[in-house]
Every structure is written in C-alpha cells, then in structure tokens.
Amino acid sequence: MNLFADIRTLVLTCLDQLVAEGTLPAGLATAAVSVEPPRDAAHGDMATNAAMVLAKPAKMNPRVIADALAAKLLADPKVAVAEVAGPGFLNMRLVPEVWQGVVKAALTDPTYGQSTQGQGQKMMVEYVSANPTGPLHVGHTRGAVFGDALARLLDYAGFDVTKEYYINDGGAQVDVLARSVYLRYLEAHGQEVAFPDGTYPGDYLKPVGEALKAKVGDAFVDKGEQFWLQDIREFATEAMMDLIRTDLAQLDVVMDNFYSEKSLYGTGLIEKAIAELDEKGLIYRGVLEPPKGKMPEDWEPREQTLFKSTAHGDDVDRPVQKSDGSWTYFAPDIAYHYDKVQRGFDQLIDVFGADHGGYVKRMKAAVSALSDGKVPLDVKLTQLVKLYKNGEPFKMSKRAGTFVTLRDVVDQVGANVTRFHMLTRKNDAPLDFDFDKVLEQSKDNPVFYVNYAYARVNSAVGKAGAFTDVADATLAGVDLSGLTHDAELTLIKKLAEWPRLVEIAAKGHEPHRVAFYLYDLASDFHALYHQGNADEGLRFVQEGDADTTQAKIALIRAVAIVILHGLGILGVTPAEEMR
C-alpha cells in the first residue's frame, strides 16, 4: 500500500473522466502530476499540482481545471474535502477510514513500504574500495556505511543489487606495502629497522611480519628486492584484505564480490576496453594543454594516447597511455567499468571519498562512451568526518601510525551508533562525530531517540499483553475508529509517508532520508506518548478497556514495524528495551 500513489491514481482517473466529458482536451501529458503532503499541514492531508501543470498545455485557466477536478474527487468516498487554493493548487482531506487502513496495512503486509520501483533492474554499487595497505580509517567508515545503506535501500525498492569492492592491488602503493612488511619481517628476526618516509610504519604490520617469518623462515633476510618483492606483495595484500574484511564485518558490511585491479593486467582487458573506445573514434594521439591549478600526476608535456572524454561531458580529454607505453591510472579504471557494463548491469553507482571529486566527470564520460549512453553512472562523494570528544577535536591512539581506524570508532560506541550517526547528514556534507553526543540519551541524539521509541512500544505492548491479545494478526482486525485525536492522526499520517519516502530516497540515492524520516516518526510518537501524561484517554494502555487498548496498541505496533524496516535499511539493530 502506497497511499500517495493510490490518491495520485485517483487524480489521474478523475482527469480521464474530465477528458471523456470534454472538459479537458485529450492527449495531455500527466507525468508531472504529483500528489504530496502540503507544505502547511493546516491546508489538508494531501495536495496535487494537476491543475497547475495541465493549464498551459490545455490552454485553460488553472482555477477552472482545479474546480472541475475537485468536484470529481469529492465524489469518491475516500475524499472528505477538496479545496482549491491560490492560483490552482488543490488540497484534499481524506476520511478517517483511509488512515485507519494505513495501520492495518503496516500490521498485515510484511512488504509495507517496499517498492517495485527498481523492477528488478541490475544495479551495481561499488563502495569502500580502499587501497589494501592497512586497516580502514574513519573516512572509509563513512563510505562503507553510506554505500551499504544505499545498497539496502535500493534492494528494498525493488532493484537487483550487487555490492562490490574494487581492490586497488595493481599500483605502486602495493610495492610500498611489500617493502613495509619486509621491514617488519626483518624486525621479527631481531633486526633494528627504520621506516623511511613514504612507507607504512603502523603497528598493524607487525603480525604480518611475524606471519611472513613463520611462512618463509629466513629465506628473504638480507636479500635484494628482486628475490622477495613479488611474493611479499601477494602475501601482504592477502593479509590486508583479511584485515579489511574483518573491519567491514565489525559494521555488518558484507560484499557480494571483491574485484582485483591486478586481474586487469596481462589479461588483455585494458587493451580490449581501450580498443572499444578506439572503434568509436574516441582514442587519438595528442598533446594536452598544461592544466590550471594543481598539476596531476598523469600529465605529460609530450604526445600521449588520449581519450576524447569531452565528447561525453568531461572538461578536458584524458590520457590513457603515457609516451613510454605504460598505462595511466585512468586506464585500468576504464577497463574495470567496461567489465561492469559487459556484466549486464543496468545502472552503476560508485561511492568515492571527497578527494576523488576530480575523477567524477572522466569516469562518467568513460561509462557513457563504453555503454553508448545506455548505462547511467552516479558517483556519490562522501565528505570528511571530524572526530570530537566533549566538543573538542579528538585524536585516539593511532595503531595505524597515521590515522584513526574504523575499529577504533566501533570499539568506542558500537556498530549501531556508528552506522546511524554516519547517516544523519547527507553524504556530501561534512560530518561531526562527537563520541559523547552520539551516546547521549536525549532528543538531540537521533540514534537514542529512535531506539527509545521502539523500546517504548515494546514496553506498552508487554503491559497490554497482560490482559488482552496483542498479536499483530489480532490487532489488524480491531475497530480503529476511535483513533481520532490530532496527535494520533499525525502519527498515522507519518506512517503513510513511509512508502513515498522510500521511493524518493531510492530515486535520489539518498539513504540519509531514511534516518531523517525515522527521527520525525519517533518525534511524533514521543509527542503522543507525552500527551498521554496529561490526557489519560491518549495513553496506550487503558486499564480495564481491552478494545480501546487494542486499537492504540495497533497504532504503535505499526510504528514499531516501520521503525524496524527503516533501521534494517540503515543496517541498525533496534534496542528491544532501554534502561
């Protein structure tokens, strides 16, 4: 059940009737007709822009269309009031039975709020994809949480989602990792070592060095790189990916697939992708103008092989092969996304850190070119996370050597708090993470506030269950006509917004909207709860009155069910009770 979609269907049916009667001309496009909550709740339950968007193509005054549409809507038993406002907006109020049906739907339909919006389209969400050179840091944490919640949201909205991690194991940074592990290996053999600038000095490599010693003994001691670099690259990368998988598991992030960059080299995949672009006339030899501002690593003042990315919306053409014949950093990324297209995905999403902003246009251009514009790529950037404690910038012990790890954060506040709080801001807005505030038990802490609503429902259900049947199947059949107080109706109307919210969030790739919605739902619930302190008739448990109690419990059980669905999208386990 999606009440807003149902009422929009009613509006379109009424418009068809006006066309059949000759009041409206035939052939009007109605895609832009919407039904949504009015900006001011005092104006009604729902509003439609139908008259406004149809006035120009119909060559009619919008007020005339709105008046005719209002008359048709009023003939439907679901509509109690249909009033024209301003130049032609139409506000509606629905009869109480419609709202009571929302409660019943939430109690009986296990898919309440889920959508068929995706229609089974294959969606690839690539996220985290951190270099396999160490544990995940707090910035990766935000990308991991955002990407995972987005994947869950899209799955809830009817897409066939694949979650993938791209292992950057083909570049020079893995050589640096191997050299750093070698130093820990020598240390494990009792040697004094020093870490030159550019290596990884974190303590997390100590056990890797010990494990390498256990595997090869002293075979690599005091040997040149040519004897051990390749072997240690593979050993260290595998060890780091085991560490990263463990880190992700701390947040309940489980990937469907890990894709190795190294698998692109020496297999012809890069060459095949570039050849595909060449066949489309998008590869040429040329010399780029010197870039303005910061000089990128892949720019050379000499002839190179270039991708005509400007033909697909980029600002400048991009090098894919250097003058010495080696590939640029961009070439394997092109090949990787070519492989995504070849695997048959209908849509692609990449989740990058904010420092990859300059990569967005070139990557979109590559996918557009490789798919002939048929496969859209959305790149979501996650902004920085600033850590605080007691309102002051906070730095923890850095076993990683240079940064605060994901595990440090989760150890401090837990996975549920970490995940929820990481989604309390839009992904491209900076996020402050205060270790005290995220654990605070107050309305200002959305993690607590939503959990407290869920726990309060459970408490009330437990009390009511002592003297009446509170099974959901039973509650769905009780008389709900007594739920008429403004605070009760406000809560029901918020429940009715859930399916619409899911579709909006999924369409915009914005899982933070779910966190915002849950906070608003919890606020309406707590407001009703507190009004019960002054008005006994609003209390959820009415001693000695089983029928009224069941109706009120039905309402708040519907709230709990929607909270459970929403938290599931965020990847958060609700608190069954709170002290």
Image (spheres, helix red, strand yellow):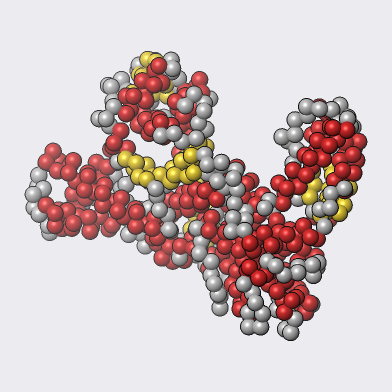
Residue 536 lies left or right of residue 203; in this view the side is: right
Where's residue 558, x and y in %?
Answer: 65, 64
Residue at image position (37%, 42%) is 166
Side of 536 relative to 509 (left or right): right
Determine which quarter of the picture holds residue 457. bottom right
Asked whether 88 or 463 is in front, the reply is 463
Q: Position of residue 443 (x, y in %)?
A: 64, 67
Q: Position of residue 85 (x, y in %)?
A: 88, 44
Residue 366, horizontal then vertical, whole percent? 45, 27
Please report the residue visible at 73 percent of the width from the left and 59 percent of the height from the top: 101
Q: Is residue 430 visible?
A: no
Mark yes or no: residue 256 visible: yes
Query: Which one is in front, 296 or 339?
Result: 339
The quadrant in which residue 172 appears is top left
The quadrant the C terminus occupies is bottom right
Residue at point 77% right, 79% down?
536
> Which of the two residues, 437 or 553, is positioned nearer the viewer here?
553
Query: In screen coordinates, is 226 left or right of 272?
Result: left
Q: Is 471 situated above or below 391?
A: below
Count of numbered marks: 0
Q: What residue is shown at x 82% (from left), y 40% (from top)?
A: 14
Which is nearer the eye, 395 or 245? 245
